[in-house]
Image (spheres, helix red, strand yellow):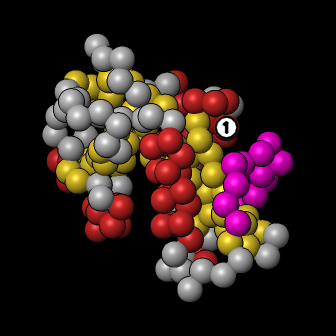
Amino acid sequence: MIEKIAIRESVPGDVASFEKLYRDAFPDEDLLPLVRELQGEGPAVVSLVAIADKALVGHVAFTTCGIVGSAKKVALLGPLAVAPARQRQGIGSLIVREGLRWLKNADMNQVYVLGDPAYYSRFGFEPEDRVTPPYQLPQEWRGAWQSLDLGNDKQPLHGMLSVPPPWRKRALWTS
């Protein structure tokens, strides 16, 4: 049960807490350079944090992207982290749902994610094959490329996801 969890936009003072959160949640991955760069993208990134007992216990970023050859507004979800001691308490779901609400209200058309289908399907994400990521995914990751239609435009999208500079690192998309 989630108790006393506040969700708010991140602020520059959260960066030190992000560093601990991401090191603890992903000890085998270095997502900190991406997180730092995304924080510098300004309004192109919706960066939300979960606060419990005055401590930052979760973070999610949604980056505004495009589709090559289209004017449609889309977003990329990630990264998402929850403090290990607070995982499986609904905090990740809470901040993802809040972020999706923000995006829908901003008339975003679609959200993409490269992540665990068992986790992201709970939000309505489905396998994506019409819009491709900016780099070819390893075969074992292809089922992890998913999207969620936010219902703001009924025309299906086709093409390649166009991402801002922080996401233009092949290592983020390959094994």
Disc 1: CA contacts within 10 A as few (<14), some (14-19) or many (>=20):
many
Percent across and percent down for residue 171 are: 41, 38
Q: Quadrant of residue 107?
A: top left
Residue 130 is situated, as x and y percent measured from the top left of the image, at 17, 34
Kindly indicate the quadrant of the structure image that contains residue 128. top left
Q: Is 14 inside the magenta-drawn segment?
A: yes
Question: Toward the viewer: 106 or 113?
Answer: 106
The structure residue drawn at horizontal position 59% and vertical position 41%, both measured from the top left corner, is 46
Q: Which residue is drawn at 79% across and 76% down?
A: 53
Q: What type of secondary structure mainly makes up the magenta span?
A: helix
Q: Tell me what residue is drawn at x 33 percent, y 28 percent.
A: 161
Horizontal side, residue 145 vs residue 150: left or right: left
User: Residue 23: x and y, percent?
Assistant: 63, 61
Q: What stretch is highlighted in magenta?
A: 6-24
Instruction: Indicate whether residue 102 is drawn in magenta.
Output: no
At x 19%, y 32%, the residue is 156
Which image quadrant is residue 82 in?
A: bottom right
Tell me where residue 142 appears, x and y as whole percent: 20, 48
Instruction: Answer left or right for 163 relative to 135.
Output: right
Q: Kindly identify the amino acid type of the residue bearing the numbered disc 1.
A: Gln
* Residue closer to the observer: 175 or 167: 167
142 sits left or right of 172 in the view: left
Q: In this picture, is 116 found above or below 173? A: below
Relative to 99, 35 lies left or right: right
Judge whether residue 80 can be spotted in this image: no
Q: In which quarter of the image is the N terminus?
A: bottom right
Callout 1: helix, strand or loop?
helix
Report the front residue among 45 and 26.
45
On screen, residue 165 above or below 89: above
* Residue 72 in view of the camera: yes
Above or below, 11 relative to 42? below
Report which residue position mark 1 lands on: 39
